[in-house]
Amino acid sequence: MPAAQLQRQYQVVLNGIALDLSQTSTMELARIRSLPEVAAVYPDQPHELHLSSSNDLIRATELWSDPVIGGVENAGEGIKIAIIDSGIMLDNPFFNPTGYSYPEGYPRGESAFTTPKVIVARTYTRPAAPPLPGNETPLPGPDDSSHGTHVAGIAAGNANTTATIAGLNLPISGVAPRAYLMNYKTFYANESPFSGSAFSIELIAALEDAVLDGADVINNSWGGRSFERPETNPIAQAAEAAADAGVIVVFSAGNLGPDVSTAGSPAYSDKVISVGAATKGEAVAAGFVDVVQPGGVPAELQGRPFGVAAFGPTVTAPVGPAPYLPAVVLDGNGLGCEPFPAGAMAGQIALLERGACTFSIKVYNAQQAGALAAIVFNSEAGGETLLTMAAGDLADQVVIPAVFVQRSTGVGMLNWYGDAPGAAQVLIDSSARVIEQTPDVMTVFSSRGPSYQATLKPDVVAPGAAILSAGFASGTGLEPHLGFGLSSGTSMSGPHVAGGAALLRQVHPDWSTADVRSALMSTAAPICGWTTTAPSLLRFSTRARAALI
């Protein structure tokens, strides 16, 4: 068939070939399907990436002390974790290769982009969608996402690495910090409408190469549509074949919650480990409003989160402590939609309520009255929602910082001012803090079952909200990949399980993939919080005991 162009051939995880049939007529395609040598013809589908204290929460730290492992310095030793994603930034300190050596038979792939820590590097691109300039290698380029770097760090970032975020220094570690990483870059920036996504042809090739390269665990923080049937999904077939070959295959469930039956493909397969997302007990957050004066400020007015403005200067340093003045004292309604008397807010931070006019007009009016900054709190209808304040009229003339807070914060500040007019002071703080939150609650965004195949998915859940790891730092170009940042999604919960599975394989090298999956599911702790299919939260230390399978 002259119009058909061969793109790839598969022999390990799928018995098939990939053809470009874009120039083939419907009649010719029907003839291909009817050939006795052709078992099935599948369309090439796009797949999307599923966008600190978590090791203690899943008790990986306890498993590090298992006599077989012998401490964090050996956790994951010799185990190979494949990351099929957007590339791993080698120069991030989370992947420092000092103290590692290549195992026998490695490096593999594009060896110039490997280290003794990241021992395989391969790139998969589409002929019709070449990478943007500077994004061609297995490393994430200036236009690529930090997703793969972040995921790899969660699974196997080096122990006791210092992560700096918004001025806060924290020691962090991957779940299996001594494990080797294998980098399979399939998601990359290009000029097509699907930039940043990956297609079935390349993803199957990466799965096949990971098996051939000797991966013990394959992490897949991506997925497709939940309503695809496994028997017509070649990636699901390839993933199952990889599991049959002895590789532990982990897939994130997706971020389409809280609706039911949203667990995506190929996470719905019974041979892979499907992972949803839950909260953890601590989180790193940046950007807070604190009422600081007079003494005796209630806890509900301290450490309150804020949203930013899409106009005016960004809050990069503390503003205050300074007196604050509710606009209602001047205009009677607190909205700030009309000019205030000149100098009425001199040296103070304005407190304004959302509504009636654009955010930028409110802040501009406060600025013209001499305000140092502005705090806008949500309307009664908006309630506790945090948002980014959009630019409107006069936005280009705003030169003071402004932040947006929840309604409860604004109303509390009004009441506090009423008790101490002229003495109430507030601090707008952009720095990061470690905050406490309720752990083990399934996140709203996490996809859940039952699957369209009437199975209970995800299999387990793991921390996936505000996870600190390599990548997603502030900056431009390559800077986001070289630093540390926060990200949320089942993409982040998947590598927690991949790292934990690596530890189990280290302790029990004779366990099959089914053994590992069974141990994870049958000994997980029940999760608290609302969920349709009641998956369980991981507790890895118990899974090292064969009696609990």
Image (cartoon, rainbow, N blue to C red):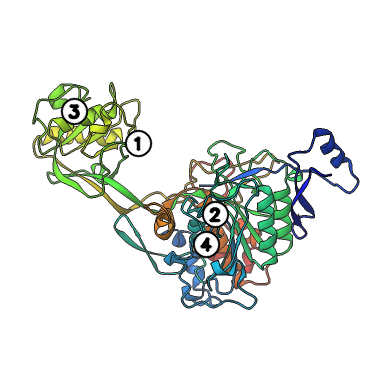
Q: What is the three-letter code of the residue carrying label 2?
A: Ser
- Residue at 13% from the left image edge and 26% from the top image edge: 329
Q: Is residue 495 left or right of residue 206?
A: left
* Picture coordinates of residue 280, whole percent (x, y): 43, 53
* Picture coordinates of residue 132, whole percent (x, y): 53, 49
Classify 10 Å Cα crowding around label 2: few (below 14), some (14-19), many (20 and above).
many
Q: Nearer the viewer, mark 4 or mark 3?
A: 3
Query: Which picture quadrant has residue 378?
Result: top left
Classify 10 Å Cα crowding around label 3: few (below 14), some (14-19), many (20 and above).
many
Q: What is the three-letter code of the residue carrying label 1?
A: Thr
Q: What is the three-letter code of the residue carrying label 3?
A: Asn
Q: In this figure, which residue is indicated by the disc labeled 4?
A: 155
Q: Is residue 22 left or right of residue 252?
A: right
Q: Is residue 326 left or right of residue 115?
A: left
User: Label 3 to label 1, Cα distance in Å?
Assistant: 19 Å
Q: In this figure, which residue is indicated by the disc labeled 3?
A: 365
| Quadrant location, the C terminus | bottom right
Q: Secondary structure at mark 4?
A: helix
Q: Secondary structure at mark 3?
A: helix
